[in-house]
Image: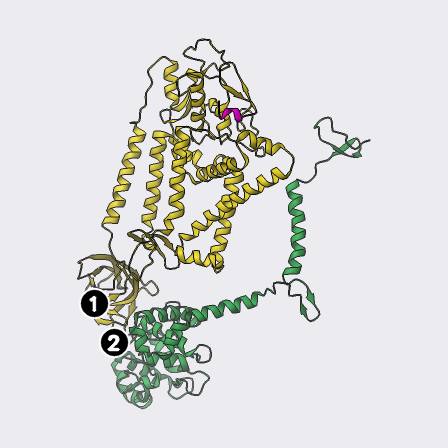
Amino acid sequence: MSGKERDTHSGTETTGHEWDGIKELNTPLPRWWLIVFYACIVWAFAYWIVMPAWPTFNGYTHGLLDHSQRENVAAAVNALKMQRHAHESQLATASLQRIQNDPDLQQFALAEGRSLFGDNCAPCHGSGGQGAHGYPNLNDDVWLWGGKLEDIQHSITVGVRSTIADTRQSQMPAFGHDKILSDSQIDDVTEFVVSIAGRPADQARVHRATKLFADNCAACHGASGHGDRTMGAPNLTDTDWLYGSTRADIRDQIWFGHGGVMPTWAGRLTPEEIKSLAVYVHSLGGGE
Amino acid sequence: MDRIDLLKLATSTDDGSYRIDVRATNSAATRKLYKAREPIHPRLVHGTFRRAKWIVMAATLTIYYLTPWIRWDRGPDAPGQAVLVDLAHERFYFFFIEIWPQEIYYITGLLILSAVALFLVTALFGRLWCGYACPQTVWTDLFIWVENLVEGDRSARIRLAAQLWNTEKIVKRLSKHTAWLLIAAATGGAWVFYFTDAPILFQQFAHGEAPAIALLSVGLLTFTTYSLGGFMREQVCTYMCPWPRIQAAMIDDEALSVTYRRDRGEPRGPHKKGQPWSSTSHCVDCHQCVAACPMGIDIRDGTQLECINCALCIDACDDIMDKVGLPRGLIAYDTDANVERRLKGEASGFRFVRPRTILYAVVLAIVGAVMLYGLWARFTIGLDVLKDRNPEFVRQSDGAVLNGYSVKLLNHADRARTFLLTVTGGELAAIHVIGVQSTTGPISLSVESDRVRALRVLLTVSKTKLKPGNQQIKFQLTDPGTHESVETRSVFVSGMN
């Protein structure tokens, strides 16, 4: 046979292979498909030569282009730093107040602060700084350690009950857990705290607790319970309660003396970034 | 006699015309569902419509290539290019108009205006856009013109395509493709000039310092111009462009289109010299219309999707009608309805005023008026207010409630200005603009020329003044100098039920 045998039914060439009288038609791959296939093979060889491709005993073949995604990322980060350099160097020297008053610098600081807040602060304080049980709300005017720009900057820098020496530090005693006061005394002090917050309370217990408060609490919270920012002692007469406002919440706090921890950000963020963050937190609404 | 003598494939006939052995490449009757492209070699014609097309081509290409070079003084803070899409600074400049991204509706309006204008023109005169002004048509026409210059007219090109590769073919093909690529590169080059300062970029190109993105854009547009104008040509219109399909909805029986007047032409066939002409049978079947067609169709098959209404077949046919001594216009801008009317012996005529055209004209007038008013009454001052949603409201230690807002002041003018911001509605205890001041009265704020100033504004309502639900408030920004004023509504959320 010449190999040009054609199938009588379809008119297509056959391959000459036959099984039980059935002949295979010769329907080759489309030309375009083959071209793409061979082009891919050529491409693969070129790729090995041009791009990093093969592992070696002590590294890998770098290829003619010496391409490295890791270096590209570093270059991109550096380019971004260069782009921000002008503003960052201004942030380094300007006072917080000037940053806030200069529209251009303020806009830069707020944008940077917002992004830093999302990365570093939002897990505890919430994405809008709205806080949670045990984590202060940063939008309101209640500040344990002060709400001025410098106060906020300092709190972010050193943290609260953090691992460094000059951290903001205070510790409320666990009056119940450490058996400093008895059960009934703690009940009395709870009523006293409820009363100075301006809510109805059992006057007999309040009367009994007056001396207890003066002896045990007033040193930090002040004689009238207005708190003291130098010690991070909260004001007990306002409507804001970090650990809850019900009698049970207040009693629980006296019993255990909860105190949260905020890490120091000094090593993790640059001083300029902390400045941006302070300006941003201040702008949330509660800044003084 | 003169030009047609060039046609080696033409044969002389008794009637004084010349018949060409040609068939319509894209005839619907013979076309398969899929077929590889057959090259079309349109013959160069001369006449009214060819002249009109040259003029339109010259005008559109001049506008395209020269516009980026027109200068326009906008002062020191703004670019001096009349038409500029400044992506880096998010501005679009068009002579005295400057559009910000916030005003993208002007572009939307322009697109709607263009679409309706196209609808109207199509309903009145058919595919004028496709035949004369579409970039695909203009550049293809330009490429065919180059082809004609280098390789000669239709018959010479057919011969060249058929002959084996020799020096002549290599030289001609090489020169043609070089010319095409140069035109394509110039086209791509002109495009990028619309996106940055043209003289500076031109210098950068000259010194080999142009940015990579400019080179990439030029490369891409060179490739598309070269392939669309040189190779794909009529296939772009037939297969890629959606407009022929949309156009089918715009064209009705009364819309003008390039029409073979079959009432006058049929039955077609050769004509003996000296025989008297009747009122019909004017088509001598010379195929000049087919040879001239850049779309590869036979217009005598009737209105077709492929026909871009370039009217070159009219010129070709008129030439023959002159030679055989018949009136021009066997192929002409006419309507199918007219052909039908004449076949029935009725009077024919054009009906430009139809419900469809009235509707398009009215819509066009309305959109145009709205656009004009929009541009005329365009504020050079703007105010955007976005209320904080997380948290929606903040209760202060004294029971007062605070709401935060992100406010943007827009100064479209080319000079720094001082605006007054007031907030009214609700019983506000304090309006605090961070970094500026705290007050209850108007706040004076300066904005640099052609810039946006972003602010954080905090509003407080004291405990005793709080009302349940949301309170409507109004931000107002005024320029005391020009008395321009804009206002934006927002809400104050008290957090009380």
- Provide residue B189's location: percent of width, then percent of height: 45, 51
Residue A216 in view (yes/no): yes
Which residues, given as a range, are shown in magenta?
B1-8
Find the residue positioned furthest to the right: A1
- Provide residue B105's location: percent of width, then percent of height: 32, 49
Q: What is the crowding at mark 2: few (fewer than 14 residues within 10 Å), some, or many (at least 20)?
A: few
The residue mark sitting in front, 2 or 1, is 1
Find the residue positioned furthest to the front: B2
- Provide residue B18's location: percent of width, then percent of height: 51, 20
Left or right: A159 in relation to B102: right
Q: What is the crowding at mark 1: few (fewer than 14 residues within 10 Å), some, or many (at least 20)?
A: many
Front residue of A94/B463: it is A94
- Provide residue A94's location: percent of width, then percent of height: 34, 78
Above or below for B467 versus A246: above
The kind of residue tagged 1 is: Ile
Real-space CA distance between mark 2 and mark 1, rounded to the nearest whole angstrom:
43 Å
Q: Which residue is mark 2?
A: A200
Residue drawn at x 43%, y 57% as measured from the top left: B201
Mark 1 element type: strand
**Image quadrant for the C terminus of chain B?**
bottom left
For the stretch drawn in magenta, the main secondary structure is loop
- Mark 2 chain: A
The kind of residue tagged 2 is: Pro
- Mark 1 chain: B
Chain A tint as drawn = green
Front residue of B315/B40: it is B315
Query: Does B7 lie within the magenta span?
Result: yes
Above or below for A269 versus B341: below
Q: Which residue is mark 1?
A: B443
Chain B tint as drawn = yellow
Q: Tag on residue A210? A: none
